[in-house]
Amino acid sequence: MKSAVTLCLVPEARRGPFVFHGGLEAGCRAAAESGFDAVEIFPGSADDIRSSVVRPVLEAHGLALAAVGTGAGWVKHGLHLCHADPSARGQARDFIAGIIDAAGELGAPAIVGSMQGKSDVAVPRDGALALLADALGDLGGRAARHGQPLLFEPLNRYETDLLNRQAEAVAFLESRAITGVMLLCDLFHMNIEEEDLAAALVAAGGRVGHVHWADSNRQAVGLGHTAVAPVVAALRAIHYDRFLSAEVLPLPSAEEAARRTIASLRQHVLA
Ligand code: LER
Ligand code: MN
């Protein structure tokens, strides 16, 4: 398993669960100095992660790109895949597609988290799930053309009413024959929704494509009360060898969140 840390390039998301802010160069330098293998970037749009801009910075700091978030489509533009307005849904899909292509050129997958959306009075849950299935099928195929999975992230009930648990998401993908999509299992959301984090990971098995390595309070692992030893044992049991990415609040500071995350990885994963 490899380590990653979040780097947010979007001023509107400064209060979000991201460790580093303040630009690509400064964030990558801090990530490398902290000892991470990779960064997970939250860009304002595909334009922020042009290969000609990002690749030299990653190379200069010896970092990989773990994944790229698409949530700025929601945070900056109010777009999501189940929006009642077809033109907003189309723009949401185009926004994600642009990031899939730009991330793909850098050899990384894109994430669908908050861009999955939620139901509302105009789009009841069944209809929203049908829209989501159609979009994920299309975008999963696009990601596959880059040799990447599309990472779909079940979110907790306070963020969406669509798919909150890993098993629900797997059943959804399988029953609708959606290919090219893997799960992003965020330990913070799982702490709210799952009965047993380790059992949920084992059940998701080979569908687990990315992990957000966060404690119960969305701080660095070690600063909350999630028992991560069984989580790591579950990931080993399913032969998970991808990223553990610290999508956590920069508390008590970005540097300390990074330091505590690396310490948790040394204690539980690299030991
Ligand atoms: C994104 O990775 C995430 O976990 C969400 O909570 C963002 O809304
Ligand atoms: Mn997450």
Image (cartoon, helix red, strand yellow):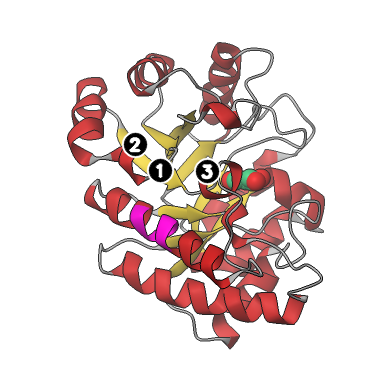
Horizontal side of residue 219 vs 242, given as left or right: right
Crowding at dot 1, Cα within 10 Å, few <14 / some 14-19 / many 20+, comes out as many
Q: Earlier in the sequence, mark 1 or mark 3?
A: 1
Tell me the quarter of the picture where residue 249 sits: top right
User: Could you say which disc has been placed on residue 246 in the image?
Assistant: none
Q: Secondary structure at mark 1?
A: loop
Q: How many marks?
A: 3
Mark 2–mark 1 Cα distance, whole angstroms, equals 6 Å
Q: Is residue 162 visible?
A: yes
Read off the magenta span: 94-98
Does mark 1 have its CB less than 8 Å from ligand 1?
A: no
Q: Position of residue 203 (x, y in %)?
A: 63, 69
Magenta-colored segment: predominant secondary structure: helix
Horizontal side of residue 126 vs 96, given as left or right: right
Q: Position of residue 45 (x, y in %)?
A: 40, 43
In the picture of the structure, the residue carrying the numbered disc 3 is: 72
Q: What amino acid does circle 1 point to? A: Ser
Q: Is residue 180 visible?
A: no
Q: What amino acid does circle 3 point to? A: Ala
Q: Residue at x 67, y 40 (%)?
A: 228
Mark 1–mark 3 Cα distance, whole angstroms, equals 7 Å
In the picture of the structure, the residue carrying the numbered disc 1 is: 45
Q: From the viewer's perspective, is residue 98 above or below residue 45?
A: below
In the picture of the structure, the residue carrying the numbered disc 2 is: 48
Q: Residue at x 22, y 50 (%)?
A: 105
